[in-house]
Image (cartoon, grey):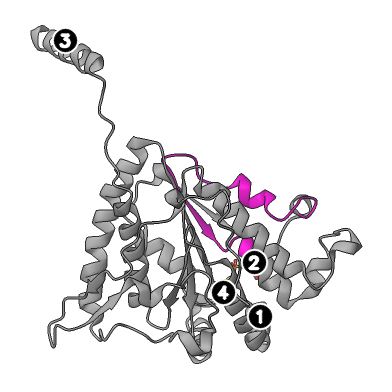
Amino acid sequence: MSPSHGKRGGDNSVKLKLREDKKVAIPLGSDGKAHFRLRQVMVPPGQRVVLAKDFDPGFTGGCKDKQASVEQLAANVRLLSELQEKLYAQDSYALLLIFQGIDAAGKDGAIQHVLSGVNPQGCHVTSFKVPSEEELDHDYLWRATKALPARGMIGIFNRSHYEEVLVVRVHPELLTRQRLPPKLLDKRIWDRRFEEIRNFERYLTQNGVVILKFFLNLSREEQRERFIARIDEPAKHWKFSLGDYEERRFWDDYQDAYSDMLSNTSTPWAPWFVIPADHKWFSRLAISMVICEALESLDLKFPRLEKERRRALAGVRAELKRER
Ligand code: AMP
Ligand code: MG
């Protein structure tokens, strides 16, 4: 079943103008051939995808050279810093970056590295944890709404409202805690949530919020190795929780929930990107490419002052020059 994205009353103005065929060349010492195209990491809106079949967590676009990708990432971080300054100065669009992924997929590290060049004043990270009592007293989009970025700002969601069709779906007892009216707790609740989320995001994009969603796609084997590393290295102990290990038992349920989420909520206005996550250096590079591409497509400009105001500034300048 393909999700309906509702054309009625719509226009194309909220469609992100990404160049899906854009080739991302990764300069290499050895064969110089590594590249990937944006569309290789994008979930086509309206299309049913199955993670295990359609996306490879180990994909690197043929790049074996971590060093080359690190240099490209550094260039993107610099570009992102310039683009953010314009986003902030123009004060018209907001950028919302959503990160989802299983434990140890590398969400925190990706946020840290990709956004390392961004002015902290122009960006805000929200980590969504198990909902508080107050949050449970509201509809599930309430806390996401409160954390939305203002115009000119970059808002980062480390986990998000999507947990509501992931962990809550895998563990139905979490849904019970939400105290919804019993007649709303039928089998169609997940389809309704997908629709609600699509509509919520469409509303946001029609009001100037640009939304990019990244699912960090980690393999079961790589998660195992990262967990072992977290146990073996004392400096990583804090990152490991027994709960994370217990969630591993639900691996297949999560894979199904992720596939369903991606199939139903990748839209022309807020697409999902499935970021291969077995190689951290590649996932960071891919994420930075997508963000730069999206911001460049907005054609951001520093605001140009009115003629009157420019004349006033010229007057002030002349006076300052005369001052001694
Ligand atoms: P971490 O991101 O490792 O700090 O863990 C946060 C935990 O909060 C994860 O286990 C999430 O699954 C959980 N969490 C986040 N949002 C929700 C939600 N809406 N309902 C239930 N659990 C959630
Ligand atoms: Mg965790």
Residue at figure coordinates x 27%, y 69% from the top left: 22
In three-dimensional space, the C-alpha distance between marks 3 and 1, rounded to whole angstroms, equals 67 Å
> Which numbered disc, 4 or 3, marks the residue closer to the eye?
4
Residue 156 pos. (x, y %): 49, 55
Q: Which mark is residue 163?
A: 2
Please, which residue is most extreme toward the front here?
A: 8
Q: Which mark is residue 40?
A: none
Q: 12 or 109: nearer the eye?
A: 12
Between discs 3 and 1, the one toward the N terminus: 1
> Which numbered disc, 2 or 4, marks the residue closer to the eye?
4
Q: Secondary structure at mark 2?
A: helix
Between discs 1 and 2, the one toward the N terminus: 2
Residue 284 is a magenta residue: no
Three-letter residue code for mark 2: Glu
Residue at figure coordinates x 23%, y 83% from the top left: 65
**Mark 3 sits on what residue?**
315
Q: Residues within 10 Å of mark 2 (few under 14, many from 20)?
A: some
**Mark 4 sits on what residue?**
263
Q: Residues within 10 Å of mark 1 (few under 14, many from 20)?
A: few
Q: Secondary structure at mark 4?
A: helix
**Mark 1 sits on what residue?**
242
In three-dimensional space, the C-alpha distance between marks 3 and 2, rounded to whole angstroms, equals 56 Å
In three-dimensional space, the C-alpha distance between marks 1 and 2, rounded to whole angstroms, equals 19 Å
Q: Is residue 259 above or below residue 30?
A: above
Residue 181 pos. (x, y %): 89, 58
Three-letter residue code for mark 4: Ser
Residue 143 is a magenta residue: yes
Q: Is residue 95 visible?
A: no
